[in-house]
Image (cartoon, rainbow, N blue to C red):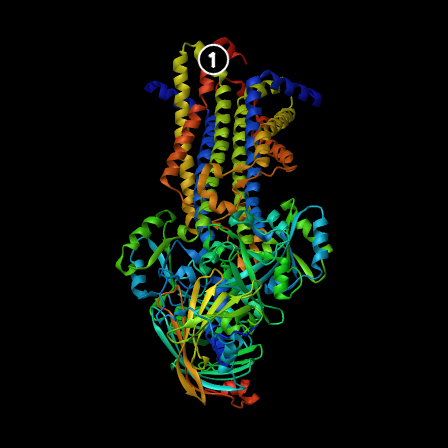
């Protein structure tokens, strides 16, 4: 019924491209030799738990809340610079990149930092994906079979990044209660029996303040809490108040975390087709 | 003396020296029996490998798209696979024909993913042709009519941290380059004992692969034959019933490294059989030569009595032939039971090795079945004849040149 | 017990009937020779079989970072690999140790990318017979030159001289890329190399993947298949290997263990059959020869030789024949071993199909060489068994002979 976006659409498109750039080999590696994130002890959440209050009187319309969430990052053309931090028990990795995105089908992403990766660019146009490698001055198209990989090293699943909308018909949403800290509403989206997806249910907390998203908790098909997403550092970007820090914390892997931070965003920018062309791709270094 | 008389004399000689004849015939017989058993057993041993390969899902021959052998492309599909399947199944000599379709897929549960080579099967045909089905350690294998279910290897289940009845999200890139998604419920988990193997097993029904890939039908048909040794003659017959754009490959072309090993094995086993045959023949010849040499005096008497040397030679040769025939017959008799037993019940290694074999026993039946054939009769006769005749040559030649008087002297030369 | 005169008589008997004696000797010698030859070939074959089963991919033992085998994550490396290599190489039982790096990559000749798999190897270390690139000119790799697998090249139209772009992920997670020249196309006995493999020198791999003094896997070959376990135990105690996982091949491919043991048992059965065939021949010859001397024995008995003494004489003859025959057979067997153990024996010429060895399966060359090997225990076993056989085979004739009626025996 309602579209369920777990992170902004434009960001998703760009991340799609980035995921391909960084994770082009995941499926292949997985196919040939398999991939597994090592299981660790169950980790406890590191952010304050949004506590539920008893009453759901005065609860707003679920559709309204979700629509506002949808509109949060909605844009005809987005231009942004993003910083991504991937924390693993072994090390922490920082990436800085700029991206341009239009709709679901077009995205260009260029890595600015670290220096070793600087100049690497990825272009997504419809179903095609190309990578530009500055070190060898080559553009290579990624075959479809290698596009399924999940974000290697980060905690986003391919489901989030690659899958186009199809949650609309698959989930039943309802307000389940109030939260105190921060004050807001808790929603639960429960998957319908015939739904195709990873999550049995997703619980999201929206603050009273402009219904900004605060947190999302994902429960897998065995109803185990699988991961938690938090939305923080609300700032004004290009005239909009949006959470600029999105953190993903997997539940059963200790010491792992992925953070996406918008450094700068422009919404509704006019982006020409030329922006999303191979020649532009090659010129970006 | 003329021919019939030589014959009569030979037979009477044999009859009169019972022990010598007995020793000769039994000696030949035992040797022949050993040689025959060994040869049949060796043939069976090389076939064990072929059986293992066929039963692990490859079959003896495979029908595939003509380009498949070079490109090994998962997306290739057979033309008119249903008709081909029917025609192949109807062909005499075909035991099972199992259609397959492959695709790369990503399995996901929660935050975990695992890439696999998904295999679409016909559950009934698969159960009849693949030993993998026996390795299901939890739950069950696929059945006719199943849909949206999967059987996965234990390594995959561990990686995804899932159990029986869990729902996996599967992602496949279809023929048009679009992502296709579906849920698959785990109905069975396979444990072969090999971590690598268990990481590569993901079986679903053929229909599910069709639905996900949007590629119709099967990409290959694995054919298990009634008589694997007739494989080379089956290939052209199968080619006739298969579409022109499809080809029939032997397992050696499908898994060339195994084919190479097989040829090496065969060569080595042939050499071993050959050694036994040579040892047997030398043993028989030795014994026969000893016997003939001791009869030098007898031959000298015959010559002194007027028999021509050439006739003595013929006598020796005739005896040799008679002994060979009788010996071969005894040999066949002695070999009958061991060969029959090992050909039907087989020589089971698991009794010797005990439990240690259970792991690879899933994929390999540790039994050697001897392979007898019409060749047994010719082999038996040939071995016996060649041995006795070799033994007869030297004394025969000697008899031709012998001086009766010196041979008759009591002094041994 | 046999007296000196019995010995002398026995000896003279044998000498006087040279043809008969030599026939018996031949049977015994051939028996012992066949036994030793097959035992030697058996050991050689087992060694060969073991190698082909575990393959150049596995070797005799392997060292990894503790969890690398689970998900083959590129960042689970063996660090300070040069120190580890040196420590392992110093072990006397180790004949070869080489480092390997594995990484999945996106490969492209033009703009179209396709999946590939980089295997970084030390070309010199892998060019021995059991290596990943047997008979390969190690100098051909390095400085950006790679070789690709046979099927991989066929499928994507990669030819020697082509320029291959490779993109992957380095050990830190950054993008790794490089341009390489295809030096050659190889047929490897290892499937994954054949179907997806891009083999490059270790140096090139470490450069591309930023893996300095790191590797994913060390493959160890020991001089003897039998000493693997103890070598592994010894190596795991070394300090550079602290925290690393070292496993014998059995733990890496457990399903192969049963297979190899089965072949072992099978070959022993074959050896037994060979022995039975030899024993049958010896017994046949000895029996025949002893029985044919009925006339002679009858004469001796009638001349006053006691049956006991006669029995002893026959026995001593059999003992002498047995000893001499076994000796000859052993000398011949050891001779064969000396001639063939270095160069190997080509069983294709002996029993196989000559044509098939000229052919190659999709680029794979078939080897029909086996390197015979013999243990002292084999020789002793053969000596004892064959000697006993020749001795036992005169028991029946002796039993008959001592109860013989001299007159009866002397009848022609």
Quadrant for residue A238, please give it: bottom left
Is residue C192 shown left or right of residue C217?
A: right
The answer to which of B67 and B326 lies nearer the viewer is: B67
The answer to which of B322 and A149 lies nearer the viewer is: A149
Is residue A164 shown left or right of residue C85?
A: right
Q: Looking at the image, can residue C108 be seen? A: no
- Give residue B300's position: percent from left, percent from top: 58, 20
The quadrant in which the N terminus of chain C is found is top left
Picture mark count: 1
Element type at mark 1: helix
- Give residue A10's position: percent from left, percent from top: 50, 81
Which chain is home to disc 1? C
Mark 1 surroundings within 10 Å by alpha-carbon count, few (fewer than 14), some (14 through 19), many (20 or more): many
Quadrant for residue C221, please give it: bottom left
The answer to which of A145 and A186 lies nearer the viewer is: A186
In this figure, which residue is indicated by the disc labeled 1?
A: C298
- Give residue C242's position: percent from left, percent from top: 28, 59
**In the rendered view, would you say B370 is above or below A111?**
above
**In the rendered view, would you say A206 is above or below C261?**
below
Q: Looking at the image, can residue B125 be seen? A: yes
């Amino acid at each position: 019924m309602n579209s369920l976006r777990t992170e902004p659409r434009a960001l998703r498109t760009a991340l799609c491209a980035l995921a391909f750039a960084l994770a082009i080999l995941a499926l292949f590696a997985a196919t040939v030799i398999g991939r597994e994130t090592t299981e660790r002890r169950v980790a406890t959440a590191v952010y304050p738990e949004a506590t539920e209050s008893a009453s759901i009187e005065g609860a707003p319309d679920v559709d309204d809340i979700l629509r506002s969430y949808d509109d949060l990052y909605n844009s005809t053309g987005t231009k942004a610079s993003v910083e991504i931090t991937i924390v693993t028990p072994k090390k922490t990795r920082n990436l800085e990149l700029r991206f341009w995105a239009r709709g679901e089908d077009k995205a260009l992403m260029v890595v600015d930092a670290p220096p070793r990766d600087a100049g690497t660019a990825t272009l997504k146009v419809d179903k095609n994906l190309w990578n530009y490698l500055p070190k060898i001055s080559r553009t290579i198209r990624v075959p479809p079979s290698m596009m399924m990989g999940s974000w290697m090293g980060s905690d986003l699943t391919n489901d989030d990044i690659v899958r186009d909308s199809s949650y609309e018909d698959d989930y039943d949403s309802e307000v389940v209660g109030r939260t105190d800290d921060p004050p807001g509403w808790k929603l639960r989206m429960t998957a319908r029996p015939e739904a195709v997806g990873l999550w049995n249910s997703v619980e999201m907390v929206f603050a009273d303040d402009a219904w900004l998203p605060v947190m999302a908790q994902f429960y897998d098909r065995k109803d185990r809490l699988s991961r938690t997403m938090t939305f923080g550092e609300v700032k004004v970007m290009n005239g909009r108040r949006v959470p600029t820090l999105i953190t993903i914390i997997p539940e059963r892997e200790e010491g792992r975390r992925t953070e996406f931070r918008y450094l700068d965003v422009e919404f509704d920018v006019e982006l020409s087709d030329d922006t999303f062309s191979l020649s532009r791709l090659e010129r970006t270094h | 003396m003329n021919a019939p008389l030589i014959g009569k004399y030979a037979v009477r000689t044999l009859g009169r020296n019972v022990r010598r004849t007995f020793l000769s015939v039994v000696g030949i017989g035992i040797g022949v029996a050993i040689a025959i058993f060994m040869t049949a057993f060796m043939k069976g041993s090389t076939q064990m490998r072929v059986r293992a390969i066929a039963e692990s899902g490859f079959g003896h021959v495979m029908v595939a798209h003509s380009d498949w052998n070079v490109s090994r492309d998962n997306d290739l599909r057979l033309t008119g696979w249903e008709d081909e399947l029917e025609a192949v199944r109807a062909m005499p000599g075909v035991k099972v024909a199992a259609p397959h379709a492959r695709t790369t897929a990503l399995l996901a549960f929660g935050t975990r993913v695992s890439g696999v080579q998904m295999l679409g099967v016909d559950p009934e045909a698969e159960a009849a042709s693949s030993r993998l089905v026996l390795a299901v350690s939890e739950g069950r294998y696929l059945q006719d009519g199943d849909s949206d279910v999967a059987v996965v290897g234990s390594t995959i289940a561990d990686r995804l941290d899932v159990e029986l009845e869990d729902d996996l999200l599967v992602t496949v890139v279809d023929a048009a380059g679009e992502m296709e998604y579906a849920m698959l419920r785990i109905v069975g988990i396979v444990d072969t004992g090999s971590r690598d193997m268990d990481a590569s097993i993901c079986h679903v029904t053929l229909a599910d692969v069709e639905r996900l890939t949007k590629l119709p039908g099967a990409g290959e048909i694995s054919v298990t034959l009634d008589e694997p040794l007739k494989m080379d003659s089956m290939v052209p017959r199968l080619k006739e019933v298969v579409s022109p754009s499809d080809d029939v490959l032997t397992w050696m072309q499908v898994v060339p490294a195994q084919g190479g090993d097989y040829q090496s094995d065969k060569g080595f086993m042939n050499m071993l059989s050959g050694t036994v045959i040579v040892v047997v023949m030398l043993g028989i010849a030795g014994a026969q030569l000893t016997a003939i040499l001791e009869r030098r005096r007898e031959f000298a008497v015959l010559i002194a009595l007027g028999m021509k040397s050439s006739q003595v030679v013929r006598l020796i040769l005739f005896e040799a032939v008679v002994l060979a025939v009788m010996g071969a017959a005894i040999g066949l008799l002695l070999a009958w039971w061991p060969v029959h037993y090992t050909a039907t019940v087989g020589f089971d290694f698991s009794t010797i090795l005990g439990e240690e074999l259970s792991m690879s026993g899933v994929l390999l039946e540790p039994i050697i079945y001897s392979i007898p054939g019409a060749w047994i009769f010719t082999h038996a006769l040939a071995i016996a004849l060649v041995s006795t005749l070799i033994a007869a040559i030297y004394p025969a030649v000697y008899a031709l040149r012998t001086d009766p008087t010196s041979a008759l002297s009591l002094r041994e030369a | 017990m046999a007296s000196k005169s019995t010995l002398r008589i026995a000896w003279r008997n044998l000498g006087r009937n040279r043809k008969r004696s030599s026939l018996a000797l031949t049977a015994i010698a051939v028996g012992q020779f066949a036994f030793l030859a097959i035992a030697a070939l058996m050991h050689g074959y087992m060694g060969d079989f073991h190698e082909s089963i575990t393959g150049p991919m596995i070797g005799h033992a392997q060292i990894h970072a503790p969890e690398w085998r689970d998900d083959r994550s590129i960042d689970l490396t063996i660090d300070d690999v040069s120190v580890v290599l040196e420590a392992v190489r110093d072990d006397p039982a180790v004949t070869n140790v080489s480092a390997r790096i594995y990484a999945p990559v996106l490969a492209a000749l033009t703009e179209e990318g396709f999946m590939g798999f980089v295997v970084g190897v030390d070309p010199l270390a892998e060019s021995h017979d059991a290596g990943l690139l047997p008979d390969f000119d190690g100098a051909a790799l390095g400085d950006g030159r790679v070789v690709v697998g046979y099927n991989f090249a066929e499928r994507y139209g990669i030819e020697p001289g082509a320029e291959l772009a490779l993109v992957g992920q380095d050990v830190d997670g950054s993008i790794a890329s490089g341009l390489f020249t295809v030096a050659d196309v190889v047929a490897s006995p290892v499937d994954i190399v054949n179907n997806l493999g891009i083999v490059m020198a270790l140096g090139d791999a470490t450069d591309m993947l930023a893996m300095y003094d790191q590797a994913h896997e060390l493959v160890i070959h020991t001089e003897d298949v039998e000493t693997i376990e103890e070598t592994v135990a010894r190596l795991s105690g070394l300090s550079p290997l602290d925290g690393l996982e070292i496993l014998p091949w059995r733990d890496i491919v457990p399903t192969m263990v049963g297979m190899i043991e089965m072949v072992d048992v099978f070959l022993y059965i074959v050896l037994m059959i060979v022995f039975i065939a030899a024993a049958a021949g010896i017994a046949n010859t000895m029996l025949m020869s002893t029985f044919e001397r009925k006339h002679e024995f009858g004469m001796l008995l009638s001349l006053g030789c006691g049956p006991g003494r006669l029995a002893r004489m026959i026995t001593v003859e059999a003992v002498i024949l047995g000893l001499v025959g076994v000796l000859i057979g052993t000398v011949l067997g050891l001779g064969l071993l000396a001639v063939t153990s270095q160069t190997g024996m080509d069983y294709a010429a002996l029993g196989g199909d000559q044509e098939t060895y000229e052919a190659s399966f999709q680029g794979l060359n078939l080897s029909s060489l086996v390197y015979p090997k013999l243990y002292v225990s084999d020789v002793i076993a053969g000596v004892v068994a064959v000697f006993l056989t020749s001795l036992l085979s005169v028991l029946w004739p002796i039993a008959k002979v001592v109860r013989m009626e001299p007159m009866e025996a002397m009848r022609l």
